[in-house]
Image (spheres, helix red, strand yellow):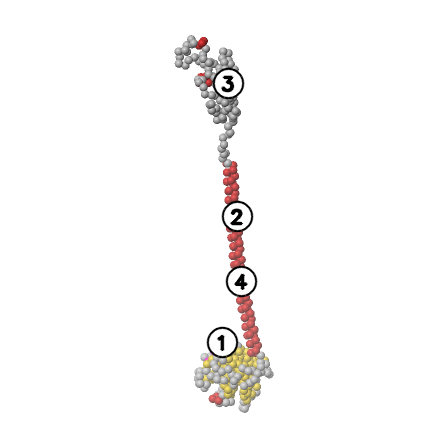
Amino acid sequence: MENRVCKQCGTQLAPNETFCGNCGSRYIESSSVGLTQLSQPYSGEAQPGQRVIEPTQSAPPPSSSYSSSPYDNTLYGPPPPSYNAPPTQQVRYTPPPPSYNTPPTQQQKRSSVRTILLGVIALVIIVAAAGGFFVVHTNQVTQQNANATATARTLANNRATATVHAQAQATLNVNATATALVTSHFPPFTTVAFTDPLTSSSDSQWSTGSSCKASSTGYQVSIAQANYFEWCTQLSSPFNDFAFQVNMAIQSGDCGGLIFREVDSKNFYVVLVCSDGTYDSGRVQNGNPLWTNSLDKRNFSSAIHTGTGQQNVIAVVVQGNTFNLYVNDLAKDIATFTDPITPLGQGSVALVAYDSTNPTSVVYTHAVVWTQ
């Protein structure tokens, strides 16, 4: 049996199927029918003088009426009978439309726009983050600088305050010292008649010269001749009965001291306080010294600070022909002297340097005179 397959769509056909049930194409079996026969139209009905020849049948032999046909001797033989081929049935199979992907131009366009938008947003976020970091960092640096400046100012203010307090305390100390210095311990002499710190580089209240020098550290009196003493006189009004006090520091040599009731350069009283802890007093009359004790037998007092560079506060209270000497302890004198001769009258006060055996230099500060 012949394999019946639709030549149009390849569908397997039953033995009796003439038309394909899938695509509607007519199935034509293989036969000896010539090509010219297949090409004739087929109307489905017999024409006058014709009969319908089924495709599966062979054409009948030519009628004898064609025996004398001029085609008898021809190669092709007589022409085939004329018939109309059946109309070709409309193909029912509609092939699917070609499958292809339309280029997603719109989608690509949207994707591009979205990508650009996301990039812009990311860039804005990055810039904002960087700007925020810069602002925060700048604020932190500014705050740190402000804190450092405030700390520096606070430290400066603290130092300035400490300096002011120190200066105030120093002023209080100076005032207290000055108050203590001008406060008399020797009644009835309590009225300040004269005071001088002796720390001015040019002091016009005292005599000047090579042996008497004013400076910012004190008033210096010097002598470099053994068994002689030098004195520098205060040039203000003379005093009669009074108390005279001064701070003394023997920088080198032997003794310092005070002169009082100096009538002239040959008549006055003198007291000496020495670096070895000894002291003496006397009267110079017409240039001749009269000592209470001979200078080689001076008395010793433990109240005197011994050695050079030591500060000693010395004071003398002059009343009539009696004189009291104080050293450091102003509540108690270390000696009392009485002039058996008619006492000298009023006179000036002076500061002394005495060279017993060594060149001597003495510095004085804070001189005060009290009267009644």
Residue type (three-letter) at the residue carrying disc 2: Ile
Q: Residues within 10 Å of mark 4 (few under 14, many from 20)?
A: few
Q: Residues within 10 Å of mark 3 (few under 14, many from 20)?
A: few
Task: Point out which mark residue 86 bears.
Answer: 3
Task: Point out which mark residue 125 bears.
Answer: 2
Q: Mark 4 to mark 3: distance in Å? A: 116 Å
Residue 25 placed where, x, y %?
A: 50, 23
Q: Nearer the viewer, mark 2 or mark 1?
A: 2
Q: Residues within 10 Å of mark 1 (few under 14, many from 20)?
A: some
Q: Nearer the viewer, residue 247 or 338?
A: 247
Q: Which residue is mark 4?
A: 151
Q: Mark 2 to mark 1: distance in Å? A: 75 Å
**Could you tell me which secondary element the residue under label 2 belongs to?**
helix
Task: Point out which mark residue 217 bears.
Answer: 1
Q: Which residues are magenta?
A: 211-220
**First in sequence: mark 2 or mark 4?**
2
